[in-house]
Image (tube, helix red, strand yellow):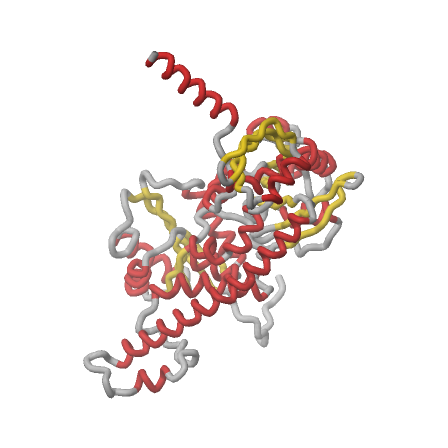
Amino acid sequence: MAKKNPHSTTPPHERAFLVGAEIRGAKQQLSLEGSLAELALLADTAGVDVVGELTQKLDRPNNVTYIGPGKVDELKALAEETLTDVVIFDDELSPRHQRELEKALSLRVLDRTALILDIFAQHAHTSEGMLQVELAQYEYNLPRLTRAWTHLERQAGGGGGAAGSTGGVGLRGPGETQLEVDKRAIRKRITHIKKELEKVEEHRTRYRAQRKRSRIPTVAFVGYTNAGKSTLLNRIAKSDIYVADKLFATLDPTTRRVELSGNEQALFTDTVGFIQKLPTALISAFHATLEEIAEADLLLHVVDISHPNALDQYQAVQDTLKEIDADHIPMVTALNKSDLLRNPENAREVLKAFPKSIAISAQEGTGVKELIHLIREELYESYSPIHVRLPYQQGALISLFHELGQVELVEHERGGMVMHGRIPGRLLAQFTPWHAKPVEERQMLNNHIEEDDLEEE
């Protein structure tokens, strides 16, 4: 065993104790054990050493300390015994829970949301990514400020003088005055960041519009974090995107043009990985980035089929897609890491549970050609029935329907037209805002009206 260098300047990792609670009746995609195992991976990604864990089943969270008083005492004893530096809870704690726990344990307390935000902060490298993470951190921390929060004094612009003055302060003490200065500084910074992100979103919107005019379809990679999306994009596009066996190794969307066959092309975009209990603050902050998914012509859902919780992870991604209004987009599923299965033939059975899916190994290249063929079929050969009501101002979409679709019926109405027919699946998302009832549903409705008329006669 190598001896530690006594002169090393590398700081030791913090020692963390994990806490998980199972609330009866609460919806949770992973089991308590599976969720804590994932929390341990998050801690490892953040550079923290896990020294122990504690669990409890509850009817409802304790109003003061989230877990019961007895468990708090047990946790305090275990933390002292293991020389714990920080306690990390698997759920998002309220400001009061965090404050009371820190008081009872005499230790720093974090929750799952704070841990994920810290990982995002470590992995954000572009100016957009750093702004998004900073916004999420500020919005998370604002309601958690206490009198101890004084390190923003330098940013407050004259806050130090206000905190130390007595004129006009009344009954408020210096600490409380400083707290208000800090909150004001944070709110001002939040407003500034949102304005900067609005500029980024405008640029991204113009870029997407330009891509749509080029008529090159886009394929967005989605999947649970560490499912192998970046490795697969590198394999398909013959690129060298950063890949690491870590959670959230990729935050910023990366787009590559790929030749599918002949003159047929597609733009493949790698996006941030999802995870269960993805913080709401992050979904809000990464709004512009997540729109890359919502505006795609086809989703490629990459699933780590070797993971014991693969089905739960698949469902977590589906839930997030619904949350960002992207669940209507056509999807192909890649069951990745099939080479890690003890019996790769098992992947064939698993395929039955996933529509339009192929078992692959992005690392080895197995099944990737078949996947590209399926993507090409979905983009260029698969037609879907559609029924839309388009205003005359949407001339580009009307022309697109006529040019690339199969028009079966056109009805002119006041202010626009109703179009029935079939279009390539990749174009469905562009027509979503103008979606009307499907032809079959409309026909059934007409038949129902006719039956009512006959009964009245």
Q: Which residue sits at x=62%, y=52%?
A: 209
Q: Residue furthest right?
A: 262
Q: Nearer the viewer, residue 72 or 137?
A: 137
Out of 227 and 329, give the one closest to the viewer.
Answer: 329
The quarter in which the C terminus is drawn is top left
- Residue at the image point whose x is 33% and y is 46% from the top: 56
Q: Residue at x 68, y 55 (%)?
A: 241
Identify the residue shown where x is 48% and y is 46%.
324
Say if 249 sits above or below 320 in the image: below
- Position of residue 334 measured from the top left corner of the image (x, y, whole percent): 63, 37
Q: Quadrant of residue 338?
A: top right
Q: Relative to 315, is 405 on the left or the right? A: right
The quadrant holding residue 218 is top right
Residue 354, image x, y percentages: 57, 31
Residue 375 position in % (x across, y down): 68, 37
Determine the residue located farthest toward the front in the rendered image.
Answer: 414
Position of 56 compared to 171: left or right? right
Looking at the picture, tell me which residue is in the foreground, 253 or 207. 207
Residue 313 visible here? no
